[in-house]
Image (cartoon, rainbow, N blue to C red):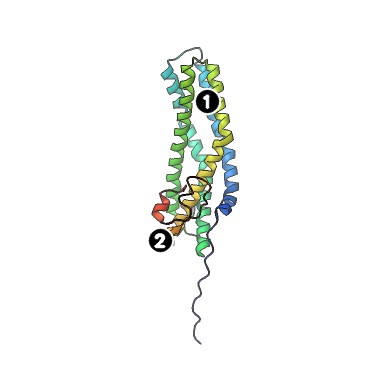
């Protein structure tokens, strides 16, 4: 008897944006839960320094630099990396798994089995740490510089910094969790497509914001897509 021709399993439809949001939801919630105490610890460290120096009256520039040095301490860099690594790794693997499912193949680009995926995570964590630190530093410098220019007391500066970090709880934790897990998910998917020999992808990311709208529906190379994981 003649052998039947091999039937390739049908490819699944790529994950829609709302499905991705659902998949990433639990990861983001846990990540936000860890980011909250991280920023609270930074706020407390800055306010502790302001209490210490209240009677010393250091020069304005010296005070600002002391506060900036606190934000860049190794304990905070290490803590941010520690709490970010799990969510980023999970998001990369989830993106790779969904891409493999779309192609009806086995997952190859996943943590911890793929060295390329590990490199992606390491690079992403470095960029994430630098970006978060730069934003916090700029915010603190702006708040303290204005307070000093206005002749504020250290107690007033502490209140201003507390307000800044309280505001982070309202918007920044969510933004970090959403953008970083989405970027990691996309990098995982793109890594899986690259492993599978895919040349082009059509971006399906909705048009609800100014970053996604120009990309939505475009047919692009993997390198171009990797260059803008948030888009």
The residue indicated by pointer 2 is 199
Of residues 173 and 1, the one nearer the viewer is: 173
Q: Is residue 113 visible?
A: no
Asked if marks 1 and 2 touch (Cβ < 8 Å), the reply is no
Residue of label 1: 45
Query: In the image, is residue 202 above or below residue 66?
Result: below
What residue lies at 51% left-to-right and 21% top-to-bottom? 49
Residue 230 image offset from top left, x and y in percent = 47, 47
Pointer 1 or 2: first along the chain: 1
Disc sitting over residue 100 in the figure: none
Q: Nearer the viewer, residue 65 or 221?
A: 221
Q: Work out how far the residue at label 1 is from the one at label 2, CA to CA, in angstroms.
A: 49 Å
**Spot occupied by residue 144 in the image (x, y as percentages of width and height):** 48, 22
Say which residue appears at 52% left-offset and 29% top-offset.
42
- Vertical placement of 146 versus 123: above or below? above
Dot 2: element: loop
Residue 22 visible? The answer is yes
**In the orientation shown, which residue stands out farthest toward the bottom?**
1
Please, is residue 102 above or below residue 28 in the view? below
Task: Residue at 50%, 61% (x, y): give it.
Answer: 100
Which percent across, then down, holds residue 171?
56, 36
Closest to the observer, 66 or 222:
222
Instruction: Say what secondary structure mark 1 lies in.
Output: helix
**Where's residue 227, x and y in %?**
40, 49
Q: Residues within 10 Å of mark 1 (few under 14, many from 20)?
A: some
Nearer to us of marks 1 and 2 is: 2
- Give the image quarter of residue 126: top left
Q: Is 84 situated left or right of 116 in this image?
A: right
């Amino acid at each position: 008897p003649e052998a039947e021709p091999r039937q390739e399993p049908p490819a699944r439809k790529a994950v829609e944006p709302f499905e991705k949001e659902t998949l990433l939801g639990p990861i983001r919630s846990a990540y936000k839960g860890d980011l909250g105490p991280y920023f609270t610890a930074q706020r407390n460290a800055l306010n502790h320094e302001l209490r210490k120096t209240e009677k010393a009256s250091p020069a304005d520039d010296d005070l600002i630099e002391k506060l900036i040095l606190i934000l860049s301490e190794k304990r905070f860099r290490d803590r941010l990396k520690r709490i970010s690594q799990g969510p980023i790794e999970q998001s990369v693997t989830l993106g790779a798994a969904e891409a493999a499912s779309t192609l009806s193949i086995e997952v190859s680009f996943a943590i911890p089995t793929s060295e390329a995926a590990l490199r992606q995570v390491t690079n992403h964590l470095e960029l994430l740490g630098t970006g978060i630190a730069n934003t916090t530093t700029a915010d603190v410098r702006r708040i303290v510089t204005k307070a000093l220019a206005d002749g504020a007391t250290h107690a007033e500066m502490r209140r201003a910094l507390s307000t800044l970090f309280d505001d982070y709880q309202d918007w920044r934790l969510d933004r970090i969790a959403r953008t970083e897990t989405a970027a990691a998910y996309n990098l995982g998917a793109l890594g899986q497509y690259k492993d599978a020999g895919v040349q082009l992808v059509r971006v399906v990311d909705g048009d609800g914001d100014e970053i996604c709208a120009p990309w939505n529906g475009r047919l692009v190379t993997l390198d171009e897509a990797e260059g803008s994981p948030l888009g």
